[in-house]
Amino acid sequence: MANILHIDSSPRGERSISRALTYEFITSWKDTHSGDTISYRDLGHHPVPHVDESWIAAAFTPPDAHTPELAEAIKLSDSLIDEFLAADRYVFGIPMYNLNIPSTFKAYIDQIVRVGRTFAVDANGYKGLVDNSKKVLIITSRGGTFPPGTPFAAYDHQEPYLRAILGFIGLTDVTFIHADSLNLGDDARQQSLTAAKDAIAQAVANW
């Protein structure tokens, strides 16, 4: 049995493609993995705050030296990290906004990527502290397409960033399913959605 953390980051509701696709995966997964536990966090509708000066002060102060104010400033971050570390697998729904991730998901990343909790640093460099046997599935929605080997590939700051930041904290087993070309006409849109749903079915069977 596994504990899966499912996170959506689109502010859209029923019109969200990324939400619909993560829902399809999770629903199918539960049908075949009934013993697993699913934890859900909706960053699109219930965003976490961006870090501020008090948060930064708390993050770089040893916990045993925290004042009540610093402890309060870092309290949500601790809770989010505890939830994150308790999961065995992760399913993220992330639309592409302006070639990157939504600010809702970036704010979440900033809350959970913390020295001493999810990564360490010393004279030899950085070390991820999250168990690297854990798997991540990221389902994206994109208006265009960014094929490798084309000039447009350099515009993709979504997948490379997510691979980098997740790898930084130790998570290197990361699978992407892209629903792209969504704004390139009805035929391209339908073809991409069909391919994404086929990939989801494969992930349910093999992930």
Image: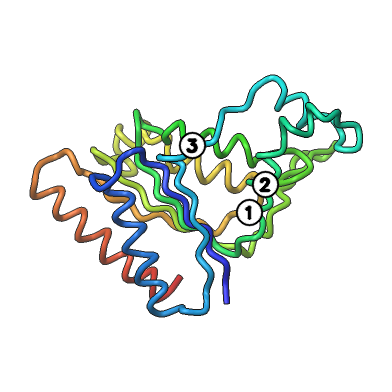
Residue underneath mark 3? 47
Residue underneath mark 1? 83
Q: Position of residue 112 (x, y in %)?
A: 64, 42
Q: Distance between the residues labelled 3 and 2?
A: 14 Å
Position of residue 69 relative to residue 135, above or below, is above
- Label 2: state its secondary structure: helix
Q: Residue at x 49, y 56 (%)?
A: 40
For this orientation, the residue located farthest to the top is 53
Side (left or right) of 69 relative to 109: right
For this orientation, the residue located farthest to the right is 64
Side (left or right) of 64 relative to 59: right
Q: Residue at x 35, y 38 (%)?
A: 11
Residue underneath mark 2? 79
Q: Where is residue 48 in the image (x, y as percent from the top left)?
A: 54, 36
Q: Mark 2–mark 1 contact, CB under 8 Å? A: yes
Q: How far apart are marks 2 and 1 (CA)?
A: 6 Å
How many residues crowd around disc 1 within 10 Å: few (fewer than 14), some, or many (20 or more)? some
Res 150 → quadrant:
top left
Which amino acid type is marked by label 2? Ser
Which amino acid type is marked by label 1? Glu
Side (left or right) of 75 relative to 123: left
How many residues crowd around disc 3 within 10 Å: few (fewer than 14), some, or many (20 or more)? some
